[in-house]
Image (cartoon, rainbow, N blue to C red):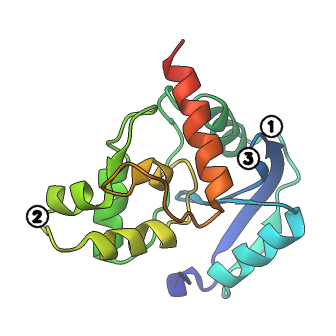
Amino acid sequence: MTAKNAQDETIQWQTGHCYLGEVLVACTPRGVCAVLLGDTADELVEDLAQRFPRAELIHANDFRAPWFTEVMNYLIDSRKPLSVELDVRGTDFQCRVWQALQQIPSGCSSSYGDIAQQLGLPSASRAVAGACAANPLAVVVPCHRVLRGDGSLSGYRWGVKRKQAVLSHEQGLSDR
């Protein structure tokens, strides 16, 4: 997804590391607009630039920025509510899917079909999967909690190994 409405906007970003690999968190004045996962900071900055080609991207260089620490803490324990504002950008359908995903509790899962049913569009499983793939807010908008109808793992924008890792991490939290 490219955010055409990011023209002349300033987006601050910061990278860090967690059990999922490298993490880039980006923030506009309205809130966190991207949480990206990958293997290197350079690849994540390139991904951010492709998503927001008209924005001015500024490295915050501040590991204590509240928007960054809040997201990094959420990655550690997703049972706690996220208190930072989100600047979610997508089509109306994508935003509806992403809102539905945010209702799935940490340690739980749903299926693409269940989300489609919840939206009143029972034949839209593939469209739900497409919205999950377009999600720019890894873990924060928990597309990793959506599985195939048979409960098996399916694709994940940041790799199936990462999807399994975050699901296992959250399951471990809920077992405590």
Identified at 83% across, 47% down, the residue is 16
Identified at 59% across, 51% down, the residue is 163
- Which of the labelled discs sits on residue 120, or is there none? 2
Marks 3 and 1: in contact by CB < 8 Å?
no
Image position, residue 88 (x, y; %): 46, 63
Tell me where residue 109 sits by quadrant.
top left
Q: CA distance from mark 1 to mark 2?
A: 42 Å
Image position, residue 37 (x, y; %): 71, 58
Q: Does the rendering let one see residue 91?
A: yes
For disc 3, the marked residue is 20
- Amino acid under disc 1: Arg
- Amino acid under disc 3: Leu
> Which image quadrant: the C terminus?
top right
62 sits left or right of 90 in the view? right
Identified at 65% across, 62% down, the residue is 159
What is the crowding at mark 1: few (fewer than 14 residues within 10 Å), some, or many (at least 20)?
few
- Which of the labelled discs sits on residue 113, or is there none? none
Image position, residue 162 (x, y; %): 66, 51
Q: CA distance from mark 3 to mark 2?
A: 33 Å
Residue toward you, 14 or 31: 14
- Amino acid under disc 2: Gly
Q: How many marks?
A: 3
* Lower position in the chain sequence, tag 1 or tag 2: 1
Marks 2 and 3: in contact by CB < 8 Å?
no
- Which of the labelled discs sits on residue 64, or is there none? 1
* Lower position in the chain sequence, tag 3 or tag 2: 3
Identified at 87% across, 63% down, the residue is 40
What is the crowding at mark 3: few (fewer than 14 residues within 10 Å), some, or many (at least 20)?
some
106 sits left or right of 173 in the view? left
Which of pointers 1 and 2 indicates the residue nearer the eye? 2
Q: Does the rendering let one see residue 52?
A: no
